[in-house]
C-alpha cells in the first residue's frame, strides 16, 4: 500500500468533529441489506471521496417482540427495528442487518477505501448478549441457549453486567466492509475476509481509521453489528450487542492494490488476517505487518520480521465467525524519526 498510514493521524488535527455531515443515512427497510455483502447489491446512497456520512444501524439482538419478551421497555426500542423485521424479505445467507451499501463514486477495483471513524453514538440504554446451541467457541460445554439484557449507563459509559460488575463502554461496529469481487457472489455476512466485513475488532472505535481494498465499482460500503464493548475472542459468539449510529469520512486512494484490510489507531498500526484456521489467520496478519514495515517504514524483510517479534503484539480478534480473526498491533511510539 503506497499511501502512508500516518495520513489519518495527521488528519485528526485538522478535522472539526462537530461539522455537519454531507449526508445522513437512517436505518429503514429500504436502506439495509440482511445478511450479505455483494457486488450486485443496489446502492442506497451515492457519495464522493472526502464526504462525511452519518449512518444509523441495528443491533443483532432480534425482533422488537423478542426484546420486549426479554424485558426491554418498548419505548427503548427504536421504531425502525420493527419496520425492518416486518418488511425486509430478502435475507441471507448471514444474519447481520447492515445499513447500506454506500457507493463512493470514485472507487474502482484496485483502489483503497479509507474509512475514518469520526464518532460513534450508542442509541439505546441496553445491550444484549447470548449464545445458542451448537454455536460459540465451546459448543459442547453449553449445549443449550441463553440470552441476557445488559443495562447501559450512557452518561457514565459503563454497562451494568451484574451486581458488582460494571464494564467500561467502548462502542465499535463489528461489521464494516465493502463488496467482494463479483465472482464471490452473495457473501455471507458472518465470516470476515479481504472485504473486511464482520471483523469484530474492538480496536476500531471512534478516532481510528480502517483501510479496505476495493473489489467492485463504488466499493459498496456496508456497516452494522453495533457493539457497546467486547473481549478479544468474542467466545460465546456475541459481544454487548446494541444499536449504534456512526459518523464516517470516506477517502479513496487510487490504484493502491492492498490485499488485506489494515487499520490505524492514535497509538498503533494494525494488520489483520482471516481464515478458518487460526494458524493461517495468524500467518496472514504477521506477514502483512512485515509487508507494512517494509513498505512504509523502509525496513529490510529480515529487520521487519525481527521487529515484529520484539515489539508487535499478535492478538486473537475473534474465534467464532467461521473465519477466525487475528490482528497484529505495532506501537507508533517506537519510531523516533
Image: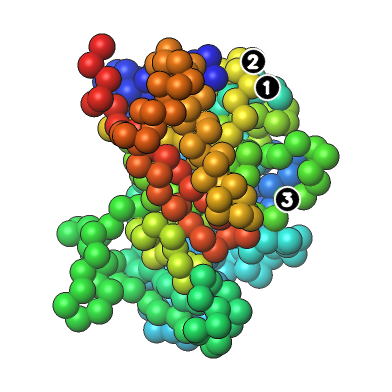
Q: Secondary structure at mark 1?
A: loop
Callout 3 touching callout 2 (CB < 8 Å): no
Check the picture and name the quadrant holding the C terminus. Answer: top left
Callout 1 touching callout 2 (CB < 8 Å): yes
Q: Residues within 10 Å of mark 1 (few under 14, many from 20)?
A: some
- Left or right, 326 with respect to 92, comes to left
Q: Is residue 265 above or below residue 304?
A: below
Q: Is residue 297 above or below residue 134?
A: above
The percent coordinates of residue 328 (x first, y second) are: 42, 40
Q: Which residue is mark 1?
A: 110
Q: Nearer the viewer, residue 60 or 64?
A: 60
The percent coordinates of residue 312 (x first, y second) are: 35, 36
Q: Secondary structure at mark 3?
A: strand
Q: Which residue is mark 3?
A: 187
Q: Quadrant of residue 77?
A: bottom left
The percent coordinates of residue 74 (x first, y second) are: 43, 76
Marks 3 and 2, how far apart at CA: 24 Å
Q: Residues within 10 Å of mark 2 (few under 14, many from 20)?
A: some
Residue sitting at 51 percent across and 39 percent down?
Answer: 285
Q: Is residue 121 above or below residue 256?
A: below
Residue sitting at 53 percent across and 72 percent down?
Answer: 136
Q: Is residue 29 visible?
A: no
Marks 1 and 2, how far apart at CA: 5 Å
Marks 1 and 3, how far apart at CA: 19 Å
Q: Quadrant of residue 254?
A: top right
Q: Which residue is mark 2?
A: 255
- Left or right, 87 with respect to 127, comes to right
N-term-proximal mark, 1 vs 2: 1
Amino acid at each position: 500500500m503506497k499511501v502512508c498510514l500516518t495520513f489519518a493521524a495527521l488528519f485528526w488535527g485538522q478535522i472539526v468533529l462537530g461539522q455537519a455531515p454531507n449526508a445522513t443515512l437512517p436505518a429503514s427497510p429500504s436502506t439495509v441489506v440482511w445478511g450479505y455483502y455483494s457486488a450486485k447489491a443496489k446502492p442506497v446512497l451515492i457519495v464522493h471521496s472526502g464526504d462525511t456520512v452519518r449512518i444509523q444501524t441495528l443491533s443483532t439482538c432480534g425482533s422488537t417482540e423478542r426484546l420486549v419478551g426479554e424485558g426491554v421497555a418498548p419505548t427503548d426500542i427504536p421504531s425502525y427495528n420493527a419496520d425492518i423485521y416486518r418488511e425486509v424479505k430478502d435475507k441471507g445467507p448471514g444474519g447481520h442487518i447492515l445499513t447500506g451499501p454506500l457507493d463512493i463514486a470514485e472507487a474502482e477495483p484496485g483502489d483503497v477505501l479509507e474509512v475514518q471513524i469520526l464518532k460513534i453514538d450508542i442509541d439505546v440504554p441496553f445491550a444484549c448478549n447470548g449464545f445458542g446451541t451448537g454455536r460459540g467457541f465451546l459448543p459442547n460445554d453449553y449445549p443449550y441457549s441463553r440470552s441476557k439484557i445488559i443495562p447501559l449507563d450512557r452518561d457514565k459509559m459503563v454497562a451494568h453486567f451484574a451486581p458488582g460488575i460494571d464494564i467500561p463502554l467502548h462502542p465499535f461496529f463489528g461489521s464494516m466492509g465493502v463488496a467482494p469481487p463479483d465472482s464471490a457472489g452473495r457473501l455471507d455476512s458472518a465470516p470476515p475476509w479481504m472485504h473486511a466485513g464482520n471483523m469484530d475488532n474492538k480496536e476500531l472505535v471512534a478516532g481510528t481509521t480502517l483501510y479496505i481494498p476495493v473489489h467492485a465499482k463504488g466499493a459498496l460500503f456496508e456497516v452494522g453489528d453495533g457493539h457497546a464493548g467486547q473481549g478479544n475472542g468474542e467466545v460465546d459468539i456475541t459481544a454487548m450487542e446494541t444499536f449504534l449510529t456512526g459518523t464516517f469520512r470516506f477517502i479513496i486512494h487510487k490504484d493502491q492494490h492492498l490485499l488485506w484490510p489494515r487499520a490505524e489507531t492514535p497509538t498503533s498500526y494494525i494488520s489483520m488476517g482471516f481464515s478458518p484456521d487460526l494458524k493461517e489467520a495468524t500467518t496472514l496478519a504477521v506477514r502483512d505487518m512485515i509487508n507494512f514495515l517494509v513498505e512504509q517504514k523502509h525496513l529490510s524483510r529480515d529487520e521487519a520480521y525481527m521487529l515484529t517479534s520484539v515489539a508487535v503484539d499478535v492478538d486473537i480478534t475473534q474465534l467464532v465467525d467461521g473465519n477466525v480473526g487475528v490482528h497484529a498491533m505495532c506501537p507508533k511510539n517506537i519510531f523516533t524519526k
